[in-house]
Image: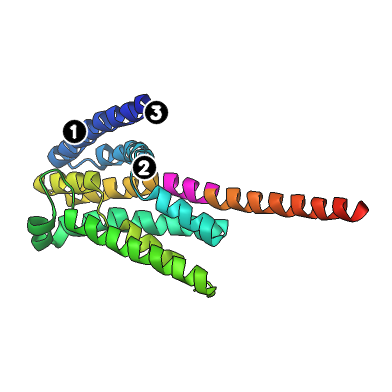
Amino acid sequence: MSDILGWLVAMQVTIHGAIAEHIQAFSGSGDWLTLLAVLPMGMLFGAAHGLTPGHNKTVLASYVVGDGVPAMHAGLMALVLTAVHVGSSVFIALGAGFLVSRTITSAGQAPLLETASRVLLLGVGLWLVLRSIKDRPHVHGEGFGVAIMAGIVPCPLTLFVMVFALSQGVPEAGLVFAFAMLAGVGTVLAAVALAASLGAKAFSQSLTRHGTTAKIAARSL
């Protein structure tokens, strides 16, 4: 497992350097073909980034399985989580100087937002437990709230590239990269959500079939 993670990290570093070169080239030439070449690279970067630890994949899968979320709804939750995760980086880079100076560290992380996300998710977890104990019905749209809370931590890689693109005077390059990152990370998270939903459904159906078979066998005795 450590070898796989090491390979993913090394690939991200390589792609990161290549993207920075493309942004610099676009800044000098204004050639959109140079910028569009970042799209597939950014998607690959996003997918590799999404496979590394983090991004609340466990939270997403646990909620989908525990609440029996349908596959389509689970996929939409994953996309909402990704959009908030990447979009918060774009927002901070483009116009939130106050937040940058007070929430973003030199490593591109956001401790205050990370803490806020954890506290909110803890609150949601406790509320879900209480709801289960009291046997209260599922609230429509609840899953999207969980996805938003899980995604408010900004993507440090997107934030770094956005800031770099702004420093080069080409914010559009950062936005293109952010779109590519959204597609890459979103694909991975959607796959996790769908796998959790379909797996939980198959397991439930299997238990039902075995239960029915056991009842038939018992009656025949």
Left or right for 190, reference 24: right
- Measured in 3D between alpha carbons, the distance from the residue under mark 2 to the one under mark 1, in whole angstroms, is 22 Å
The part of the image, by quadrant, that contains residue 148 is bottom left
Residue 32, given in percent of the width and then of the height, sits at 25, 43
- Measured in 3D between alpha carbons, the distance from the residue under mark 2 to the one under mark 3, in whole angstroms, is 15 Å
Q: From where the camera sits, is residue 160 visible? A: yes
Residue 219, given in percent of the width and then of the height, sits at 89, 56
Mark 1 lies on a secondary structure that is helix
Q: What is the span of residues highlighted in magenta in the rendered image?
A: 186-195
Dot 2 or dot 1, earlier in sequence: 1
Please tell me which residue is depicted at 22% across the width and 40% down the height of the picture: 31
What amino acid is found at the position of numbered circle 1 in the picture? Glu
The residue identified by callout 3 is 1
Q: Is residue 144 above or below residue 185?
A: below
Please tell me which residue is depicted at 31% across the width and 27% down the height of the picture: 6
The residue identified by callout 2 is 50
**The magenta stretch spans residue 102:** no
The residue identified by callout 1 is 21
Mark 3, residues whose alpha carbon is within 10 Å: few (<14), some, or many (≥20)? few
Q: Is residue 135 above or below residue 144?
A: below
